[in-house]
Amino acid sequence: MNLSEHLSKEILAQYGVAIPTGRLATSAEEAEASCREIDSAKYVVKAQIGAGGRGLVGGIKFAATPSAVRAEAGKLIGKRLVTDQTGASGEMVNSVYVEEAIDIAHSYYLSLAFNQHDGQPVLLCSDKGGVEFEQAARMDPAIVSHLTLPSDGGFDESAVGSFLEKVGISGNARDGVMAIAKGAAKAFFDNDATLVEINPLAVRKDGSAVAVDAKISLDGNALFRHPEFDDSTGDGQLEEQERIAQENDINFVKMSGNIGVIVNGAGLGLATNDMVVDAGGKPANFMDIRTTTTSLQIAKGINMLLQDPNVTVVLVNVHGGGMTACDTVAEGFAIAYSRSNRKPPVVVRLAGTNAEWAVNVLRNRRLNFDSFDTMGEAVGRAVEIARAGRA
């Protein structure tokens, strides 16, 4: 779950990370009024969305006066921002964050994440932070340095200090960045985050450091340990499809392809999507039906795919076992299809507990589908249909 900037900064501030003075506003009038609580000669108005890249598409505006803040907020609130991370549909701006403008002597990039190869926590840092950092990093990955951290959440200031100096951060600036790195690391481990990102991490002329922008992503599977985040989805940053998925015990991520994928199990879901891509197709989503999901909940999740006009074929790859039987998924699929006006072609591969019965369920409901015994055959057929453009 991605937290918006103001929530991310609120968390970081609790761990001693310096942030600019700012206020959240849901209307242009509220944005103007918030300036009275911010002691600054200049203001920044920032669209609050979960995706990154907003600065490159007009989502961050500078304003010299409260009336200018009101004007800029009015232009942003109610607008959809389309960035490299949102997909073509963009993300709705329901609120803005108004904060003091910071005089920046140098911008750095700093984040904490997990190494995708070995699962170890890493501290990432670059001396080329700012709105164009991601593009620069794609062109030259060498601009980002990384340091593996202890998996128990320990923070070795000596090791981190040496690392920062290698990045090019020394003197007073090193002390300021060190303090932010320490607080960010504590926030990362305490809150079961998958990402804590500060960009830009600004250093002023006096060497003091401040998190000008921040983003925190939480591990959705660990939210049961953090009831304090239960209301965070009400921040307006959770897209409608993701909200429906969460309410119905389904892990769901919208993607930009045209092959709807229905799978039980995160590992099988990732493997299925990889196979689709390897076969030349493009998944429209990642879906993981959890073991506790009922057939009615599955139907609501599948209905999201059927309503997506980009989905031209649906691939069902289910291995029944444990608490999830194939016929439970088949019942949910049949319910969703019977209620939907859109009925794209269906390709199924069902194996494991009650697989044969599940196929009979789909046949008895008079659904037209292609059934295969192997994942490779099913994926190949789905890609073939998608290429043909049948809907």
Image (spheres, grey):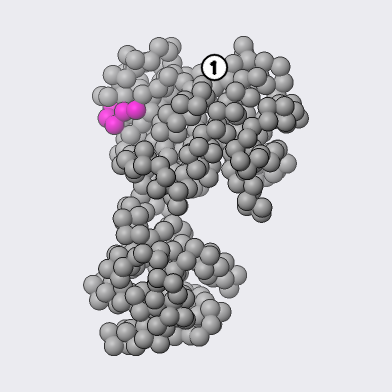
Amino acid residing under circle 1: Asp
Q: Position of residue 328 (x, y in %)?
A: 34, 75
Label 1 CA crowd tier, 10 Å (few <14, some 14–19, many 20+): few
Residue 94, quarter of the rendered image: top left
Q: Relative to residue 375, is residue 85 depicted above or below?
A: above
The magenta stretch spans which residues?
24-28
Residue 55 coordinates in the image, percent (x, y): 49, 35
Number of numbered tags placed on the structure image: 1
Residue at the image position 53 percent from the left and 45 percent from the top:
194
Residue 25 within the magenta-colored segment of the rendering: yes
Q: Quadrant of residue 254?
A: bottom left
Is 180 contained in the magenta span?
Answer: no
**What is the secondary structure assignment of the residue under circle 1?**
loop
Residue at 56 percent of width and 79 percent of height: 376
Q: Return the residue at label 1.
A: 103
The correct choice, above or below, for 299 with respect to 39 in the image is below
Q: Image point 31% across, 77% down: which residue?
A: 331
